[in-house]
Amino acid sequence: MSKSAITIKDVAREANVSVATVSRALNGHHNVAEPVRKLVLEVADRLRYTPHAAARSLSSRSTQTIGVVLPDLHGEFFSELMRGIDGVASAHRWHLLVSSYHGDPQQQRGVLQAMRGRVDGLLLLSPYADNAEFLADNLPSAIPTVLINTPLVGSQHAVFSIDDHAGALAMTRYLLDSGHRRIAFIGGPARNQDAQERLRGFRDAMAAVTDAEPIELPGGFDESSGHTAGLALLQHGPLPDAVFAANDMMALGCLYAFNQAGVRVPEEIALAGYDDIPLARFVHPALTTMQVSIAELGERAMQQLLQQIDDEAAVNNGLTLVPHLVVRDSTQARSRS
Amino acid sequence: MSKSAITIKDVAREANVSVATVSRALNGHHNVAEPVRKLVLEVADRLRYTPHAAARSLSSRSTQTIGVVLPDLHGEFFSELMRGIDGVASAHRWHLLVSSYHGDPQQQRGVLQAMRGRVDGLLLLSPYADNAEFLADNLPSAIPTVLINTPLVGSQHAVFSIDDHAGALAMTRYLLDSGHRRIAFIGGPARNQDAQERLRGFRDAMAAVTDAEPIELPGGFDESSGHTAGLALLQHGPLPDAVFAANDMMALGCLYAFNQAGVRVPEEIALAGYDDIPLARFVHPALTTMQVSIAELGERAMQQLLQQIDDEAAVNNGLTLVPHLVVRDSTQARSRS
DNA sequence: CTGAAAGCGCTTACAG
DNA sequence: CTGAAAGCGCTTACAG
């Protein structure tokens, strides 16, 4: 494709040295005479020479790039995660090869395979509760890999995740402690592990209180499913005391439904979300939610990965971040902020 | 890094054929006897062989990856753009190498250089109005490149962008047509070309009406600067008739300030944004805004790029998308939705 | 249809 | 400090 790219040979010829010397000078090795180094750098600059990454990778056996494999490129979670990952990558001068497999195991398999020779390490987000085995089978064995939000435990790989069971438990308990008994839960995608854990937390907290009345509604983590769930609640009999949506986007959709119907939050019904996306504090009423440091999750995972690449013997223990409760107006009549 | 990766040699040895034959069989060339092809595929599969991308790239002179160079990885705009780009990339089995240069020209330069040998084409988002020259100097000449939201016109590169001047003009005219005269504009980052164009559209529309009273406030495209601007409006004298924020996030921040102060939208003041992010319709009141098809922008740009890579002689004309007005409750007392 | 060999553009022991 | 040469793992004319 590239038309007439300048190679290391051109630089060597122009500078009257061998390609080996050019390579050494450009890579900052110390065994190059100062005047020679200067000359080489000057010539390389004048010719606008840039090393060919594939060639360099092939001979040096390193790519300086990290593969980031995600189920999707869309939305707040991904955006935040990438921010954390990118911050670390950029600081250490690593490149990022980003691939989405669109939630499809076959594509995921292909994407993982295609990483060989392209990356020195792999960050994989695979939040499906049912494919631990699939992963164990398809993870490239030769590439250092760190997992995010993934059900594969007890393997050789470090896993970084959010303790969603604890988070949902905390939120539900808070709602119960506030005096609510009939609490509706809007769930996430069935296969999604985070969604499952949040549901489990909700159930466990509700089960611990004798007169609690749990209501469960389906959802898909997007605004519109929250909106749909809100409408469903409005239509079927008396409103519950509170709604706990498994993520903020659904909570916002639900809030919208309540707003349209003239149902006041929190006066008539309390509403809580999960994730603490930036917008949670800007809606009205501001949303009570569980704060999850997604960017930090990406940051930590990336740091761990770089460490493993740097030192194969590095301990590869993961980390489970515990989200914390952020109380805002949507669950209490008076502002505390 | 990779420990004991299987190479094409291993497959050749195991299948009792030459590496050339393995290569042909795996790449689907037709000059391979059927039984031989089958054998090779079977062996490759059994050995879990995956071609080394760098080696393949080096000899075939193609990487099957597109470099996406962005000023930032954060936020709705990026997320939407990536969705469009990824959709096309995925459908054509291309990989994406994503780099953020964090708004820093030096980093941008480095990132662009590092693309040689890594990608077959480049998608560059560089929304700074003042660095057309810098770009012309630093764009890799040997790599097909398509520009997004970039001030470099009249060059050899296709440019895909949003007609923000027309968009802001349309919104401002709509507000004027609704009877508003004192209209406040919350601007974006000074160096950002989109922000400049939106401001220019606002000014042009206001200048065309004799008794219009423009008010201009600074902003930074994020929620908090919108919030700050809203507070400023609340403190300084009488409220304007309407607020036009240069993007939705700022509009939401401003809305929040009004909500807190008990100022009702749209009864006491109209409010409009720009971008039509998914949340615009879920806030209360739903936000009037300019709908910009960001995903489509990414999609089109990516399609154009692939075409150019496929056929060097392809016409490389860009495209300017014109946003359209979406009227919701934030600028009118009664819902029309 | 198949193999031996050259070559892609680098890096890095190995000699000197 | 420097160069000649081997090698990274593939692909692809060139012969046969």
Image (spheres, coloured by chain):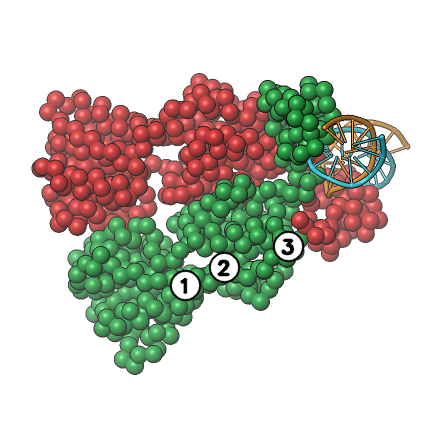
Chain colours: A green, B red, C cyan, D orange
Q: Which of the two labelled residues, at mark 2 and mark 3, occupies the earlier sequence position?
A: 2
User: Do the CB atoms of the residues marked 1 and 2 lie less than 8 Å apart?
Assistant: no
Give the x, y percent position of residue A135. Answer: 58, 59
How many other residues sit within 10 Å of disc 2, few (<14), some (14-19) or many (≥20)?
Answer: many
Figure quadrant of residue B74: top left
Task: Name the residue at 30% across, 27% down.
Answer: B196
Q: Residue furthest left?
A: B238
- Which is nearer the eye, B132 or A203? B132
Task: Name the residue at 72% across, 52% down.
Answer: B4
How many other residues sit within 10 Å of disc 1, few (<14), some (14-19) or many (≥20)?
Answer: some
Q: Amino acid at mark 3?
A: Glu
Secondary structure, mark 2, is strand
> Looking at the picture, do discs 1 and 3 lie on one chain?
yes
Residue that carries the numbered disc 2 in the rendered image: A160
Left or right placement of residue B81 versus residue A155 in this view: left
Chain of the residue under the numbered disc 1 shown in the image: A
Q: Is residue A199 above or below residue B90?
A: below
Q: Which of the two labelled residues, at mark 1 and mark 2, occupies the earlier sequence position?
A: 2
Give the x, y percent position of residue A160. Answer: 50, 59
Q: Quote the CA–CA distance across marks 1 and 3.
A: 28 Å
Q: Which of the two labelled residues, at mark 1 and mark 3, occupies the earlier sequence position?
A: 3
